[in-house]
Amino acid sequence: MASSQKSFVMPRQSILALALCAAFQTAVMPFAAASDDHQTATPIKHVVVIFQENVSFDHYFATYPHAANPAGSPAFLPHHGTPSINGLTPELINYNPNSVKPFRLDRSQAMTCDMDHRYTQEQQAADAGLMDKFVQNTGAHYGNCDPSQVMGYYDGNTVTALWNYAQHFAMSDNSFSTTYGPSTPGALNLVAGQTHGVTPTDLAGVTANGTVISDADPAYDDCSNHTKPVLAMSGTNVGDLLNHKGVTWGWFQGGFRPTAMSNGMPVCGATSQNIAGKSVSDYSPHHEPFQYYTSTSNPHHVAPSSVAMIGKQDQANHQYDLSDFWSATESHHMPEVSFLKAKMAQDGHAGYSDPLDEQTFLVQTLNRLQRLPEWKNTAVIIAYDDSDGWYDHVMPPIVTQSNDPTYDALTGPGSCGTAAQGAYQDRCGYGPRQPLLVISPYAKPNFVDHSVTDQSSILRFIEDNWNLGRIGDDSTDAKAGSLSSVFDFKRNPANRLFLDPSSGQRVHVDGDEVSEGHS
């Protein structure tokens, strides 16, 4: 086992972010706990992480806050004084170094092919910071897919809700995947800041040198495809830290509840239709990070013993169906930390989902959350597991180096910077830039955070707010940038925004009732 004391080269932005985090922790006095909550470092008593799928920052925010506004699409007009972002300028569009220029995808083009988002191919697309090899490496080269589609981006006429949330709350234009690669590494980085410690250690194209670099189902999940190799993680995750402190928490995923039993085993057979009319399975095992760890798994998908026990230690072991979250909140048992995972048709993953189905989920979830009495001390974080390989023009800082001759390729063949002696290999990162939004009464309105953060910055915020300590074993939580810049804890905690799930535009609010459009 490699030593947990590693040396690494930290970019200046990350050093500044750590300094801000330290100042934040010393400047904010702990807030007294409510009867069912624990003492927190901020007024935030409930964190809800909505973890979506496969979007680069430019794919959703390339031209923010300027939308084309064609006839027949929901119009988007920015607020006066909207801050600028690091997006696609006319020059970068017209003189782009890739073989195809970036181009706008219309609302009618919501369904697209799934791009190539493997660990090595994403590094090759970045091409040592030239960011010029996306069509060749992460474009979809299968079936009838056009690889040039990888250069496409949406604007506020399609991802209208997200742009409106950015106007009313806070977003980042400098947040990254913790490492390169697809969903499983991203999910593990969210909950542990760690992709090392996997068994089997060297599974071609999936694990290397004891590190996860691709997707495979979790070992501790009966709904995994056990006809193929499955993965088990060792070590600690945030669920273990939360359990140690007695903080209520849960992972809530669409389709987790079994639809039947077969030979004593649960069957996760629920399906839904996306906007294209295609039937899609609700549950994806490799999107459920806690099922990779024996300490936090619910292999048989056992339901909680009661609504009152949701978030607490019982037979469900903190792993639930998405419907259990609403059962808990509506009975005033909202967990202190909740991770929400949409059913697959609504998680935004290209190929089987899309930004319009995703918007329906996001808006319905946030409209419902904002009606709760707990909203006044809640922070919702919208983040993504990986970029899907979609084009983004920003080269990430190299915070975690790796030199695997088979799988690394960022700064040259077999190279992602120069790893320190004894460092865990195959964790090349930071990876691609992704959207990150914070929706909260305490979020700075119409604010763009430019500080460097990554997926494990969310983990770090949870750790710091509940004084959980760190994961250890070279988890990236120890060097993750702080999210404190997006909050203003002197604000009056009454900020809300209700949107239409279909159009993403603002809707009339009468008291606590909101008139929503049909999705």
Image: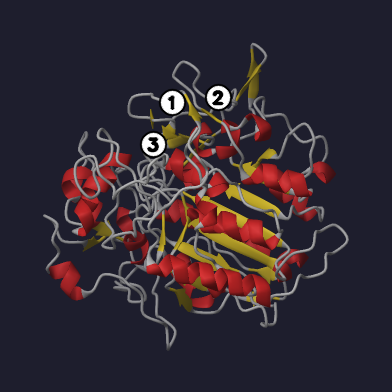
Q: Mark 3 or mark 1, which is nearer the start of the sequence?
A: 1
Look at 29% across and 73% down and name the residue there: 68
Q: Is residue 310 above or below residue 102?
A: above
Identified at 35% across, 73% down, the residue is: 64
**Residue density around tag 3, few if under 14, some if 14–19, many if 20 or more, within 10 Å:** many
Looking at the rendered structure, the kind of residue marked 3 is Ile
Instruction: Kindly identify the residue that appears in the image at 79 percent across and 48 percent down.
Output: 246
x then y, percent, for residue 148: 18, 50
- Residue with the mark numbered 3: 213
Q: Earlier in the sequence, mark 2 or mark 3?
A: 3
Helix, strand or loop under label 2: loop
Q: Position of residue 436 (x, y in %)?
A: 47, 62
**Label 2 neighbour load within 10 Å: few <14, some 14-19, many 20+:** many
Which marked residue is nearer to the observer: mark 2 or mark 1?
1
Q: Nearer the viewer, mark 1 or mark 3?
A: 1
CA gap, disc 2 to disc 3?
A: 16 Å
Q: Quadrant of residue 261?
A: top right
Q: Which residue is mark 1?
A: 201
Q: Position of residue 226 (x, y in %)?
A: 50, 18
Q: Marks 2 and 3: which is nearer the front?
A: 3
Task: Write down the residue under mark 2.
Answer: 219
Q: CA distance from mark 2 to mark 1?
A: 14 Å
Q: Is residue 519 visible?
A: no
Which kind of residue does numbered mark 2 sit on?
Answer: Ala
Q: Is residue 27 above or below residue 388?
A: below
Q: Secondary structure at mark 3?
A: loop
| Residue 130 visible in this rendered orientation of the protein | yes
Residue 498, horizontal then vertical, whole percent: 59, 70
Amino acid type, callout 1: Thr
